[in-house]
Image: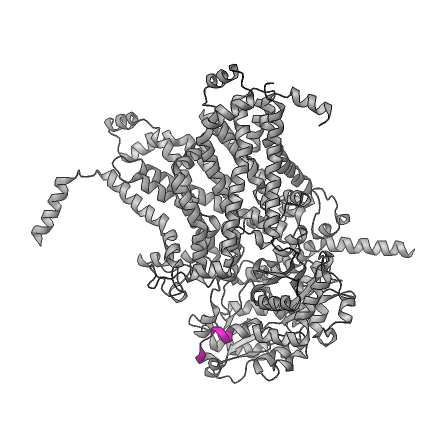
Amino acid sequence: MSYDLRVFVKHLSPGHVFVAPALLILFIFFLAPVAGAFVMSFTDFDIYALADLKNLSFIGFDNYINLLGSPLFWKAFGNTAYFAVVGTPLSIAVSLGLAMALNTPGVGLKPVFRTVLFGPYVATLVAAAIIWRYMVDFQYGWVNRGLGVVGVPPIDWLGDPHWSMPAIILFAVWKNFGYNMLILLAALQKIPDELYESARVDGAGPWSRFLHVTLPGVAPVLWMVALLTVAGYFQLFAEPYVMTQGGPAQSTFSLLYYMYQDGFKYWNLGHASATAFILFAILIGISFIRNRSQESFA
Amino acid sequence: MKTWLMKIGRMKIWRMKIPSVPTLIAGSVLVFATAWAAFPLFWMTSMSFMPEAEANAFPARLWPVNPTLDNYAELFAYQHMGRYVLNSLFVACLATALSLAFNITAGYAFAKLQFRGREKLFQALLAALVIPGQLTMLPLFFLLKNLHLLNTYVGVVVPFMSSLFGIFLVRQYALSLPDEMLQAARVDGASEWQVFRRIVLPNLRPIMVTLGVFTFLAAWNDFLWPLIVLSDDTYYTLPLAIAALSQEHLQDQGLMMAGATVTIAPVLVLFILLQRHYVRGLLSGSVKG
Amino acid sequence: MTLTRRAATGLLASVAVSSSLASSLASSLAGCTAKAPLRVWAMGLEGEALGPFAREFERSHPGVTIRVQVLPWSAAHEKLLTAFAADNLPDIIALGNTWVSEFAALNALEPLNDRLKGSAIRFDHFFDGARNAVTIGDRILGVPWYVDTRLLFYRTDLLHQAGFDVPAATWDRWDAQLAALSGAGRHGLLMPINEYEPLVALCLQSDDSLLLDNDTRGGFRQAGIRDAFAYAASLYERGYAARIMHSEVTDYYSAFARGEYAFIITGPWNLGEFSRRLPAALQDKWATAPLPGPKGPGASSAGGVSMCVTRASRNKEVAFSFVEYMCNTRQQAVFYQATGDLPPDRDAWPMARLMEDERTHAFFDQLSMARPVPKVPEWERIANEMTGALERVIRGQVGLDAALERLDAFAWNVLTKRRTLLARQRSFQKSGAA
């Protein structure tokens, strides 16, 4: 260690030393790569450049222009938005419903219910997706058999472009509802019983109590959870990768799948980075809404 | 017959309180939802014990008639499943250890130590939370290539080493440590490192378990990043291995289900054992973060 | 300031130690064997079949160990490119022939011209299509290991029941046969929508080339190619072919056995699979035939897999001797016995009694008519998009001409870099000449 460095270290406060390793790692393996990706998105980094860096050049906004003019990008964007916009309310509704059920006084075995209901969330995504491929199989799957019992004709879940995304959403709801359920349950438990009591005294029915006591009580948490879920759902990848490989007719092809395919299948890194940044812009937009709304709730 | 029914009816009324309507509805919703949540996992386990003919039977069966361990034997004998289990275990443990090493100190410092630029740094980290990890993947790949960390366990755990989530989680918990306790130790002449070692660490133990479980589960379940970093199947983790298996052996349903069971069972068990800690992290991580 | 320097360095040191410990653990786990093993990557069933041959090679070459890694076909291409980007290519890759040009452009493959000269591999006896696929310019970058081409597997009994003695040789006649064999929930033909090989094969039957102008732009709007697309689309539209994806076809062997399909367009690896997986009662009721063409037996793609030695290999000598071991005439015949994969060396055919078997004889004829696909690195992407275009037409999302126009636009986009590089090369040559 040189003298200067030693003096430098001496003048650091202990706090600096405590945060240094973590921040250093974050800088090297997180922030620097983000900057790298940003630069990369303005180059034509591809397999030719991979073979010989002389084949690399800056191309300005071409990747972005190209991307915004490509039907496949808009297909991926549309699919991802579909997944997020339909999947989120469904997930939240299931989570809230079950959280309320778990919060109902008098129901026994709550810890058991809670644990089992949370099981899908902990289960490895890839393995669960494999199970669900069989679950939604056209001939053989339990979903179609269940539908058959109530008289619905079998649906070609993964083969029909109209049904593939609903199948993925069904799977995602099953996989994810547990997480939000626990958060909403904690929020529900914070609503004072007196509020319900006084509502009851005022003659409010269950539906009215739900609208006027429960919903306002969990609204901030509900809203935050919804936005986090939207942001998470915009990062759809492993489900279609394992279940449908983006098909049929690219109906489950997502933005992140596009980035993966562009980047790590065809090694069009410039183009893929541009896709990643557009996804990033979307997520920033969502978090902006979150910050604004947190201020208004506070 | 009739008296018997009446007897049962009377017994119920006599012995138990009649549940209220909302309780009945909530209870039946929970029973139904639990069945829905558990069924795929139950079927996975059940099918993994079916011989090939039963697993492929149409219509699908719920229970194995002649339970067998053949699928597991095939996995471990011919598909190197043992190696993948060890890989996953090692990767998850390494990620957990590194994550604890880096995040605990930083989280504690952000909560309890005064240093120049603390608030600004913390705000910057908060802002960085919105950056999706996938954004870093392309350049990170080349960075790791230059560090010769591709196709290594360390390469797989790099994203877990120091995480914004981990730092916030620890900070949130450390805020509740009483300042007087730390101050008393300082007055006794302990260095900051000694304060950390002797006072802070023992008190942070619950949140360490929480962060540990979170990291372990995340590392065990991670898919996209290992898929990119590991091209050599010597290092494959379980999710990669079963994804590869599913691309070639989809028709061998019993085998696939056995693979899924081997992958899912350990994390389920871990969760059930440590769920108290897990749920705490989940709540403090998202409600306040 | 109370924090000791010892503690600070201790913290940093623990970081360094833990990461270096982990990486050394990783490397020690990887390098269990004293000498680095020869790494071979191969795809699918052939990869699984390679194991025993590798063990045999190890026995005759003491000190050499071989580690075969099997890649699933559907993820092989991305795995290979990722490994290249990671500098982690193995010593030998069993490379799909259509990918050779891509890895040649990456300069990832070792030219084998000199090594082939004194070897047991009789390269000049190989099928033209196979030789052509691995020859880029004047460099030979791989040795064909097995060849494949797509043709028809069909149920003779179903064809007879429908009143036909021989499988069709022309599209018109095939239409008649498929019409008789389809309907009432049945489809005459299995041809998964997102598998590009059958579609490419149909396109190769035309005299028009898929790519034009030194492979710098798509030629999908030419009459011949358009006809092939229109024909392929009509197979689905008329219900002759099932509208299913590759990932949905879980068990087509039993579907073929149940008679759900009378025709399957597939490759030689299924000769072995059909013999093994179809019930005994059906074994004399299936046969193979060349693909029908617009006017007569048509061309098909010259597919297959070649063993390539990578430039990155530290042990090219041993690597090539393993290639030689696998690809000499006799071993090709043996490998056929083991897997049903067809030998690229014509001389291996009589040796394996392949000419006596009508099922394989059809392949010999089809292989002699095989045509190569464009040899550009971008081909894989374009071919994948071809199925995308076809799928959109079949599902009624766009008209055929619009789809082909979009396909040309896609190809134009994908080939941008190639045009730039070629232009740069030309101007360089010009300035070099001046």
Percent across and percent down for residue C419 are 75, 55
Q: Is residue C277 magenta?
A: yes
Percent across and percent down for residue C370 are 66, 73
Whether residue B129 is visible here, answered yes or no, is no
At x 53%, y 23%, the residue is B194
At x 69%, y 75%, the residue is C127
Count of marks, rendered view:
0
Depth check: give the residue in front, B173 or C148. Answer: B173
Quarter holding the N terminus of chain C is: top right
Q: In the rendered view, does B239 fall on the left or right side of C320? A: left
Q: Is residue C278 magenta?
A: yes
Q: In the rendered view, does B132 fall on the left or right side of C134? A: left
Return the residue found at the far left.
B3
Whether residue B197 is visible here, answered yes or no, is yes
Q: Which residues are magenta?
A: C274-281
Depth check: give the residue in front, B241 or A93. Answer: B241
In the rendered image, the vertical position of residue A258 relative to residue C340, given as above or below? above
Query: Main structural element of the magenta stretch: helix, strand or loop?
Result: helix
Percent across and percent down for residue C421 are 77, 54
Depth check: give the residue in front, C378 or B278. Answer: B278
